[in-house]
Each structure stands twice: as C-alpha cells, then as structure tokens.
Image: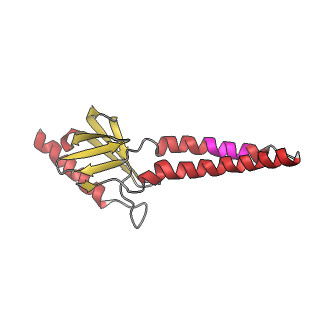
Amino acid sequence: MVLLSSKATFYYKRVFPVTFFGFLLLFIGVGLFVGLKTGDYPPIGFFIAPLLMIAFTYFLLKMLVFDLVDQVFDLGDALLIRNGGQEDRVELADIVNVNYSALINPARATLTLRKPSLFGSEVSFSPPMRLIPYTRNPAMDKLIARIDAARRNKA
C-alpha cells in the first residue's frame, strides 16, 4: 500500500482550524475580560474584525479543506479511501475523471466515480506536498495514466 494523500491533511483539517479559531476567540475573550475588569471596552471594530475573519476562514475551509478525505492508498488495481474511521475500496476502472489542481494550497485532487462510494460520487484528497510548490505532481500523473489504462482494459 502506497500512501497517495498528504500526511499534512490532519494538520489542515484538525490542527489549523482549532488553533486559528481558538486564537481569534481568545483575542475576543481578552478584550471582553479587560472591558469587564476596567469598564473600558475596546472599540466595536476590535470585536467585529475577528468575527469577520472567523466567518470568512470557516467558509474558505469548508470549500477547500473540510471535504478532503483523510487518507488515500494505492493498492495497485484499486484505491483504498479512509475518512473518519470509515474506509472504502474503489477500483481504478470505476474512476471517470481525475481533476488535479496544484495552484491552491493545499493542492487538491478530485476523483469522479462511476458508482458512488461510501463518500459520494466525488472524492477529494490532498496529494503529497512537493518541494517546489505549484508544479505538476509526478505521482498524480502516474495515477491518471494507470486509471486510463485500467478503463481501456475493462472496456
């Protein structure tokens, strides 16, 4: 089994949001605490700016990160997909399309499936990080070629 997904997915999905949102909530909490102690509250912008940052970041993470599966393993003729304690096997021939985008962070690969899996008809994961970001990923190029060969052999 070869890991096709990034080891940093856990950080992107779990560690970064808790740290980021926790810091902003702590920032707001300190402002409230100081205001309660002294009776002199910070200006309203002190509270609105972090709340806007929380809302914007949440929707951005919801679109780009929270839907990523935890792990994708290459089994040779199939992929093993794991997310949240569940796993499903998807044959390479059952993958209709692979959409790979290296121009976002984290990089993102979306598999469109012929038959919906346990995780739906589209499965997104973050491929391994590259030393030179925003460049083509050879592992993804090989996977696309193998998926194409598997579809031709099945037909």
Determine if residue 33 is in view. yes
**Residue at horizontal 37 percent and vertical 55 percent from the top:** 6
Q: For this view, does 58 lie left or right of residue 9?
A: right
Instruction: Find out whether residue 75 is within the magenta segment.
Output: no
Magenta-drawn stretch, dominant element (helix, strand or loop): helix
The structure's colour scheme is secondary structure
**Residue at horizontal 42 percent and vertical 52 percent from the top:** 9
Q: Position of residue 79 (x, y in %)?
A: 24, 46
Quarter of the rendering containing residue 54: top right
Q: Position of residue 20 (x, y in %)?
A: 59, 51
Q: Residue furthest right?
A: 39
Q: Residue furthest front?
A: 37
Quarter of the rendering containing residue 110: top left
Determine if residue 42 is in view. no
Q: Position of residue 125 (x, y in %)?
A: 37, 47
**Residue at horizontal 65 percent and vertical 46 percent from the top:** 53
Q: For this view, does 68 lie left or right of residue 117?
A: right
Q: Position of residue 14 (x, y in %)?
A: 48, 48
- The quarter of the rendered structure image containing the C terminus is top left
**Residue at horizontal 20 percent and vertical 44 percent from the top:** 92
Q: How many marks?
A: 0
- The quarter of the rendered structure image containing the N terminus is bottom left
In magenta, the rendered stretch is 48-55
